[in-house]
Amino acid sequence: QQQVKQSPQSLIVQKGGISIINCAYENTAFDYFPWYQQFPGKGPALLIAIRPDVSEKKEGRFTISFNKSAKQFSLHIMDSQPGDSATYFCAASSSGGSNYKLTFGKGTLLTVNP
Amino acid sequence: GAVVSQHPSWVICKSGTSVKIECRSLDFQATTMFWYRQFPKQSLMLMATSNEGSKATYEQGVEKDKFLINHASLTLSTLTVTSAHPEDSSFYICSVVVSGQPQHFGDGTRLSIL
């Protein structure tokens, strides 16, 4: 059972454009939603994270939008750059669970063309 | 700087041998570390939770006798793939949990079994 569904599987954006990646979750106990960026041959790096008490969080060019009633959250990358080309994973965890155990989405391969 | 160090970064070995992968927390004492496996173009799959001073907790479907985990100190956890076979070839990634902070991931170990 896939608890976090991520789409699209791949995304191609022109430099300067907006990249949007969506995730939906099923477990209402989830209360922490991070996004990770992974380059080939490297481990994931935390990009930005949100908790359900806010509907949006912005850090630089990266914004998370969160819809608790719909159980959905999305990552927006403004002014996308070729250096943003990577695989992005959404994740979710329950703080009441086993020490921040994360459930990952399947990932989105983002390509930003120059 | 790096919070988590994984070693080796890449290992090639013959089928039937055992391979040990180290995960070190550089800046924090970590009572909990996670071990993940990632196949090409796929998401991270949690294998086990490594707890300092106690037995690891394995996810369903992961053979505990095949993937031996030792967390003997607050800064080191090891994963030993015993009697490795080609189907064990994968990217193995550890993460460190520090109270109040998101998971910090290592840069992974690429394991190739010939």
Image (cartoon, coloured by chain):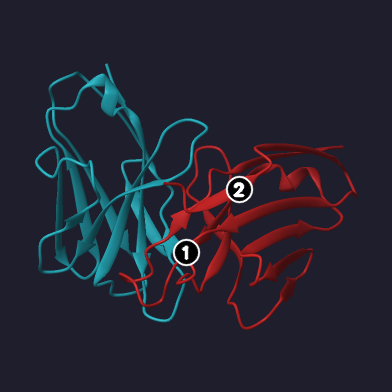
Chain colours: A red, B cyan
Depth order, front residue of A53/B89:
A53
Label 2 SS: strand
Query: For the point 67% across and 81% down, which residue is it?
Result: A54
The kind of residue tagged 1 is Asn
Question: Distance from label 1 to label 2 (Cα)?
Answer: 15 Å
Q: Nearer the viewer, residue A95 or B100?
A: A95
- Residue A93, compared with residue A112, is above or below; it is below
Disc 2 marks which amino acid?
Answer: Gln
Is there one chain holding both mark 1 and mark 2?
yes
Q: Residue at x 16, y 40 (%)?
A: B63
Q: Residues within 10 Å of mark 2 (few under 14, many from 20)?
A: many
Give residue A11's position: percent from left, percent from top: 74, 38
* Residue drawn at 21 percent across, 71 percent down: B74
Q: Answer yes or no: is residue A88 visible.
A: no
Of labels 1 and 2, the one closer to you:
1
Q: Residue furthest front?
A: A69
Q: Is residue B49 left or right of residue A48?
A: left
Q: Quadrant of the C terminus of chain B?
A: top left
| SS at badge 1 | loop
Q: Identify the residue under disc 1.
A: A27
Q: Which mark is residue A6?
A: 2
Q: On what subunit does the disc labeled 1 rest?
A: A
Pinpoint residue A59: horizontal percent, then vertical percent: 73, 71
Q: Is residue A94 visible?
A: yes
